Amino acid sequence: MNKKRKEYVLPLVSQFEKEAKPLDVMMSDNTTIRVFTTKAPADKRNGYTLFIISGWGTVLPSWNELLIDAFKDFDIVYFESREKGSSSFTRKSDRGMYRMALDIKDTITNLKLNESKLVLFGSCIGATTIVYGMVEEMYNPYMPVLLAPPGRFEVPPVLSYLIPISPTFLWSIAKPILRFWVNKFKTEDQKQAAKYLRTIEEADAKRWKRLGLKIVFKRYWKTFPKVKNHVLLIAAERDKMHDAEDTMKVSKMIKNSTYLNLETNSNTHSSVMVDTIREYLPIFEGKN
């Protein structure tokens, strides 16, 4: 019999946060977006910037292992999208996938990043946002890396009907349903469960609803066939949260895609992922 998983949260401050410089970057709609940046040591720098857009509500410590390995030779920009509490999102802030992709463009512009040396790495809805921006010709990165980009964002069936019509004060009722769903059906181990449970605990219900109705409840399948860039498409076929069949479906839609299976969520958030990116850097020369 399996022991019941403990609901615990990750450390409030990760090692990467201690090393990185936080910046509040002004967007073109006057919202500020928090990014964390680091520079690789001069004697080991490979000349590329790894720009990371995490999944919906994902907390930075979820990526600590990957980030600590990556900043050995990459300059890093870790981007916190506007559904996260670090942004200055208000009622007047713009919403929708176009705006989320434009946030990436604004950040690239404001930080004066060289797109010919830019690795745009997105996870889940962050990956779909990268795709949307490329299709809209907002940016043209050297190497787009897409980890399990969804054509639709999965939520528990009951909540998918209740969220659009329910007031946000009912979030306290929804949270136990989400916790049970994550623990029971959507995680491969306790470590992954802990990351998602912290995301649920730190969620801003009003912000999530205002943005989510414009983003999470949309379908993006028709966007993928429009991608002209060559992309590195990553699946974790044992990851219960991100359906590998959906990632395979995306790979068939994006003509110039290279599909890799890294098996587990743990691998995609670790040095295994960084080594994969390093391996493919020379292969992408001249492709975008």
Image: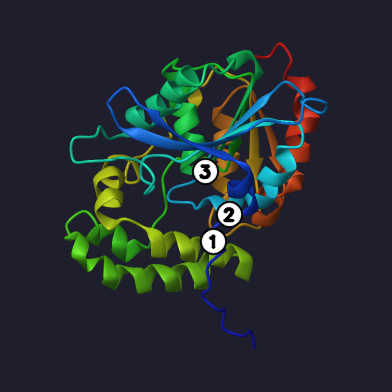
* Amino acid identity at mark 3: Ser
- 272 vs 69, nearest the viewer: 69
- Seen in the image, is 263 located left or right of residue 85? right
Q: Which mark is residue 80?
A: none
User: Is 269 located above or below residue 2 in the figure?
Assistant: above
Quadrant position of the C terminus in the picture: top right
Q: Residue at x 37, y 32 (%)?
A: 100
Q: Which mark is residue 195?
A: 1
The mark that comes first in sequence, 1 or 3, is 3
Q: Quadrant of residue 163?
A: bottom left
Say what secondary structure mark 1 lies in. Answer: helix
Residue marked by disc 3: 54
Q: Report x, y in % for residue 160.
A: 30, 57
Q: Residue at x 35, y 33 (%)?
A: 32
Q: CA distance from mark 1 to mark 3?
A: 12 Å
Q: Which mark is residue 62?
A: 2
* Amino acid identity at mark 1: Lys
Number of numbered discs overlaid on the protein picture: 3
Say what secondary structure mark 3 lies in. Answer: loop
Residue 96 visible to the viewer: yes
CB-based contact (under 8 Å), mark 2 and mark 3: yes
Q: Quadrant of residue 145?
A: top right
Q: CA distance from mark 2 to mark 3?
A: 9 Å
